[in-house]
Amino acid sequence: MPRLSFWFEFASTYSYLSALRIEALAAEVGVAIDWHPFLLGPIFRAQGWETSPFNLYPAKGRYMVRDIARIAATRGLVFRLPEPFPQNGLLAARLATVGVRDGWVAPFTRAVYVAEFAEGRDISDPVVLADLLAAVGVDPGPAFDAAASPAIKEGLRVSTDEAIRLGLFGAPSFTAADGELFWGDDRLEAALAHARQSAV
Amino acid sequence: MPRLSFWFEFASTYSYLSALRIEALAAEVGVAIDWHPFLLGPIFRAQGWETSPFNLYPAKGRYMVRDIARIAATRGLVFRLPEPFPQNGLLAARLATVGVRDGWVAPFTRAVYVAEFAEGRDISDPVVLADLLAAVGVDPGPAFDAAASPAIKEGLRVSTDEAIRLGLFGAPSFTAADGELFWGDDRLEAALAHARQSAV
């Protein structure tokens, strides 16, 4: 089965859109998804940004909110910008890295995005994250222990380094086995088509 | 007939994609297009950028070239990044402002984009622009005289101010009569649908 890597950052609004639809779309076209949590913070800081470009460039930020609201409406999704924005997604990303290892990354990631962008919950709060883990059938204690381990912390750093190596500069991004890169929820269909085509 | 404003900047690679397809798409859905040349330079400089973000952020620039090459291929278009990039589109934008007044903005704009992004010609060169004007049936002499007039120079400045007032931060952008803003060639279909729907 052809594979596509899905690179997501928990602070990213457009990653929310992709996380909620990628599995259904991929199943329709027979592509398997590899979920890759990574951090945009180090990538943004390397180009001199200390916060989200949507905060640095207010016109772009206002447009993003409107653009996502329009798209969310067509997909039956709720969207509101969390307060504060961007949220600190480090702990969630470490937990998702545990989820990649243990097989629950997809439902956990979807639960985090819904909590953050539909329900206005604070995804940097361990209490919120424990609640989300439990809701998708994961025992929070061992998951938090693993998330705090050197191996998982290093795994997330390696994932971010790999993202940079692949040319990523934003999220969501998608990479095929041949290295072809697609950026943005609006390129998901093209990325899936490429994954299928290049695997033939 | 519902109307949609098409805001384009001659240095913008994604504006090329929209300029070549907007009239055909708009005709299909019964929307009239108002062509608005404007300048991104003043908008970029106001946020501290002295060149294209595709130069400031090289990973983003490399991706843009690949992304447009993929899209161009599906549309039967040629694309190559001009040298230097971005091109200086000031004179072309002043001429296009004359074209708005005199009714030849659409064919002239398409000719400029093809020269720039398919043929690798220097669109800051008056000789090239005179050639393109003649090719679309416009007498270059009076067009250049008008482009150098205070009224046209001021018209382009006013257009750029209006773009800022409407919340524009990039190109291509599309605005409907109700002020709804869409950014990017990949939002053109949604912008046309909105223009139709909001005019009902």
Image (tube, coloured by chain):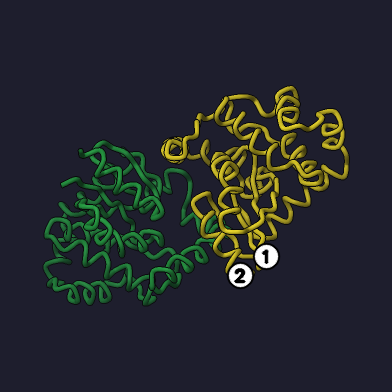
Chain colours: A yellow, B green
At x 57%, y 40%, the residue is: A16
* Viewer-closest of B6 and A34: A34
Q: Is residue A6 left or right of residue A154?
A: left
3D distance between C-alphas at marks 1 and 2 = 8 Å
Pointer 1 with pointer 2, Cβ within 8 A: yes
The residue tagged 1 is A177
Confirm whether circles 1 and 2 share one chain.
yes
Query: Where in the figure is residue B94, as x and y percent of width and height?
Result: 23, 59
At x 32%, y 73%, the residue is: B115
Query: Where in the figure is residue A105, as x and y percent of width and height?
Result: 72, 42
Q: Can you say which quadrant of the picture contains the N terminus of chain A?
A: bottom right
Question: Which structural element holds mark 2?
Answer: helix
Query: Where in the figure is residue A35, as x and y percent of width and height?
Result: 69, 49
The residue tagged 2 is A198
Q: Is residue B145 left or right of residue B127?
A: left
Query: Where in the figure is residue A153, as x and y percent of width and height?
Result: 82, 42
Residue positioned most to the top = A127
* Viewer-closest of B170 and B199: B199
